[in-house]
Every structure is written in C-alpha cells, then in structure tokens.
Image: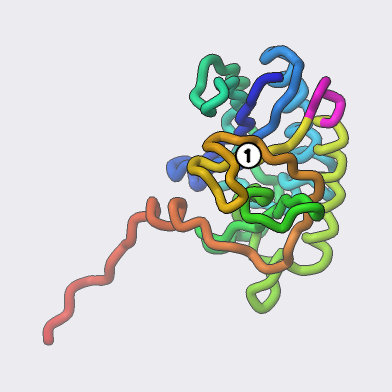
Amino acid sequence: MANFRLRVNGLLNASLKWSMGYDIISTAALATVASTFDTAVGTLWTTAVNGIQQLSASDVTVVNTTVYQTNASWITTAKTLTPHAIAGAHGTVTTDYGSSPFVFMNNPANDSRSFRGHIKLPPLTQDQYLNGLLINAAVTSLNTVFQAFFTTMKGLAGYEVVSFNRKTNKLGDAPFTNHQLTNYTISDKPGTQRVRKRKALATFSATGTL
C-alpha cells in the first residue's frame, strides 16, 4: 500500500497560482493512479452543465494534474505530471479570488480532527453566489460531479481517502498515521483561501493631499 498526494494546479488571471487536491492510499502503481486521477478530473471539470468549467470564468484555468507518490512520512519519492489547458466557460465575472468553495471530508465513526479533510476549489463566477452564499444550483452541480469523480477514483485497487497527523495526536497516534475518510459534503458557505488572496497585488489611486 502506497501513499499518494493528488493535486490539480491552475492559474487565476494567467498569473496567480491555485491548487486543490487530497490524499489517498492505494495498491495501484503510480502510472495507474495518475491516469485514473486525470480521467476523474476531466469528468469533474468538463462535464456539460454541472462541471466546474461551467461554473467558472475564462480567467480560471487548469494547467496540470500532478500525482506524488510518497514514503510513509509523506515525503515525495516520485511524481507524474499531466499538462492541461482548460479554461472556465461561464460568461460572467469571477468573484473574489480568495473565495473558495470547500468539499469537507470526514469519517462519521470518529469525530476527531485527525479524521477530517477538505478540498479547496477555485473561485466561481459571481452569479453562483447570493448574499455571500453559493446558490442551491451551484451546490447541486458540484455534488453531482464530485460524486462521479469519487466513483471513478474508487476503481483504484485498495483505494482509501486519508488524512494524517504530523505530530502525536490526542488519540495517541504516532506522527504520519493515516486515518480513513469515508464521507464528503459541500457547504453553501464558501471559505477564504488566504494564500491566493495574498498573492493578488493591490492597485492604488492617485495620491491626494492632506
């Protein structure tokens, strides 16, 4: 059983980097995991009507999918990168680049923080929000394509979604213990991706006198 980090990498306005992903274990080879993940991301992104491409503007792009195989301490030992050039297809303007719809992952059998994870999506277009929340149609679309995405990923041999603790946790688990996550849900309340927000440079008005 090997550890894998799965990542989708992209750009905002052709300059600001964004990424999303999650961690798994599998008995499959790196090439198989990379191919399966790339296929699943294609479904997630380009599915007609419900795909993320249909909920995002052209300044949100996907540039590659990357799968990292790691050792037991989650240090990369090998990787496979698959390039892409996928742009959002929805015609309206992207909302705040720091806005990030979240996919929350957990295990109902254990409420410890070690059994939680999340996937941070890129920002969607302004019309997918109302009063600061995702509209119901957007949440439904995301849930539809993520269900298809995870169904594809479950085809990998020995597949499990996992989180891990970097230090000994309250359960007494040693560092880098994998914890299986079994369920996901999508909130209508977007989170804030502070790293993406900080990368955006401010433009100032002309200087005035005091």
Q: How is the image coloured?
A: rainbow
Residue at 72% x, 58% y: name it: 111
Query: Which residue position holds label 1?
Result: 21
The image quadrant where one finds the C terminus is bottom left
Is 143 inside the magenta-drawn segment? Answer: no
The answer to whether residue 124 is visible is: no
Vertical relation: 14 (above or below) 97: above
Residue at 73% x, 67% y: name it: 188
> Residue extending furthest front?
172
Q: Seen in the image, is 21 located left or right of residue 52?
A: left
The residue under label 1 is which amino acid type? Answer: Gly
Q: Seen in the image, is 121 located left or right of residue 109?
A: left
Q: Element type at marker 1? A: strand
Image: magenta residue range: 154-159
Depth check: give the residue in front, 145 or 33.
33
| Label 1 CA crowd tier, 10 Å (few <14, some 14–19, many 20+) | some
Q: Seen in the image, is 155 located left or right of residue 16?
A: right
